[in-house]
Amino acid sequence: MHVVTTERHYKDKVYRSHLLRHSYREDGKVKNETLANLSHLPEAVLELIKRALNGEHFVEATEVLEVVRSRLHGAVHAVLTAMKALGFEGLVASRPCHERSLVIAMVAARVIQPQSKLATTRWWDDTTLPALLGVEGATEDDLYSAMDWLLDHQTAIEKKLAARHLCEGGLVLYDLSSSYFEGSCCPLGALGHSRDGKKGTLQVNYGLVTDALGCPVAVSVFKGNTNDSKTLLPAVKQVQNRFGIESLVIVGDRGMITQKQIDELSLDNGIDWITALRSTSIQQLVTGGHIQLGLFDDRNLFEIKHPDFPGERLVACRNADLAVRRTNKRDSLLQATDKLLQKICTRVESGRLRGAAKIGVAVGKLVDKHKVGKHFDIEIADSKLKCTINKDRVKTEATLDGIYIIRTSLNKKQLDAPSVVRSYKRLAQVERAFRSLKTVDLHVRPIFHWNEDRVRAHIFLCMLAYYVQYHMQEAWRSLLFFDETAWITESDDPVAPARRSAAADAKALTKQTDDGERAHSFRTLLGSLATIVSNECRPKHSKTAPTFQIVTTPSKEQRKAIDLLTVLTA
């Protein structure tokens, strides 16, 4: 018996029939008898029938093979592929050593599954990561020793990163953030301005230096009560002295680059800067008549000069969308605060709250809860409380809604006004780095280490993990819910909010990429790759037989993701 496939063409269509036939000889002639029409069967079943008729013997795979163990492989393979393309091993250390392998393993683990060092050693035993890097059996103490080794090599690693991503006269972005501790023993821990909203907890500050695109280059760690501006000069000196870059343009926010820092930076001819004025300074310029608000009727950007800022350029901007948002936010906060104060007024009127001191304490707890207490006029007596919104004060502040002023030491030949604004707005890239470091992906917080050097090493390790993730995200832009065009270009209005491209909006709406595949976040794409596993197999009923590996065949989507990482460049 055999299977015969016939084709019939009708109106540009091809119809195939699969027939089971029996051949026999009659009167010296070979004849065929059709036993069954198999056309309705799936192709895979037809193939099995053909092979069976050819004499092959089939048994269930589970009767002859067993899977001894399965290890997560796909996400590990993706991260290590990215690291190889980036030359990450050479960044960490030029020569192979066990500590380098452990550091690379910890960085990869933090990109894939950020958790404590002890939990990491438990997690990666179920992956192919230790075997691929030769760190099988590594303990928590081994990881701590590798962290100590990493801290000793931090300067050398950051020099290599700076050589890759910084250049003479280029932009250098700098900002500061903080993370809280679990515990109270670390010398770096101190009470300060908590950016995590964890009031009353000890925290550590860390400043991040990046290139103009937000790629991390260096990180410095400070006590939790260190003022933002005090960290700027060490960061600048680090770039100059450690990295050998004599001239640079440092970009920092208004709380980072203060007048004191500007005075000190001006002593070095190689340092230029871009920052913004505080709202109080803007108000003084408006009330003094140095900014004519009517000029914003025709344009949203113009330059001004002022004797209080000698040798500087001031670029005044007005963002209409930002103005609307600020007005609405202030109105909401005023209403919320007024509602809280009226509750106290009701208590005073009913006689449940008496005495100017007690009333003052109650008001003091609530009046500035939403940071708008300056807009209220409050009269307090022993049995009287009157709280009203000062509309004139609100109106005065509202005139500045959407207005901000960029100040810089750069002259017009070095950078025109629109480019100055674009350069300042690049600080959003550092904020994106902090979001990834702290919450979305790498989870630098909470910090459980108590040894000062281990805290520094932990934060540096997280920065290296973000370095790898940053480049993976750039390579995967077409697969992620990312805009594939530059976030801000020379042709864009520098003042207007950055707009997503039409292609990015379509991707967000359809949840699909241009080629019809699923669009992902960075985490969900890693999760998809994690379904690729390495199965350790052996013949069944033979415990001494050697094992062999069978790796899940990647899907089209998974293969594309890995292929994009192979051509990644730093």
Image: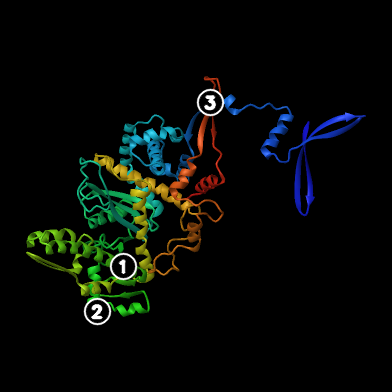
Q: In this rendered view, identify the residue nearer to me: 202 or 144.
A: 202
In terms of sequence position, does the residue under pointer 3 or pointer 1 come before the other?
Answer: 1
* Res. 239 visible in picture: yes
Question: What residue sits 32% from the left and 80% below the top?
Answer: 294
Classify 10 Å Cα crowding around label 1: few (below 14), some (14-19), many (20 and above).
few
The number of numbered discs placed on residues in the rendered structure image is: 3
Q: Is 328 placed left or right of 386 in the picture?
A: right
The residue to which callout 3 is attached is 547
Where residue 448 appears, as percent x and y from the top left, is: 27, 40
Q: Mark 1 falls on what kind of element?
A: helix
Question: What residue sits 28% from the left and 65% below the top?
Answer: 332
Q: Is 43 located above or below residue 478 in the figure?
A: above
* Res. 134 visible in picture: no
Query: Which three-letter amino acid code belongs to the residue tagged 1?
Result: Asn
Q: Mark 2 falls on what kind of element?
A: loop
The residue to which callout 2 is attached is 289
Image quadrant where residue 30 sits: top right
Which dot marks residue 328?
A: 1
Query: Which three-letter amino acid code belongs to the residue tagged 2?
Result: Gly
Q: Is 48 placed left or right of 386 in the picture?
A: right
Query: Which three-letter amino acid code belongs to the residue tagged 3?
Result: Thr
Where residue 150 appears, as percent x and y from the top left, is: 33, 40
Q: In this rendered view, identify the residue nearer to me: 262 or 76.
A: 76
Image quadrant where residue 102 sits: top left
Classify 10 Å Cα crowding around label 2: few (below 14), some (14-19), many (20 and above).
few
| Of marks 2 and 1, the one in the foreground | 1
Question: What residue sits 38% from the left and 33% below the top?
Answer: 122
Q: Mark 3 falls on what kind of element?
A: loop
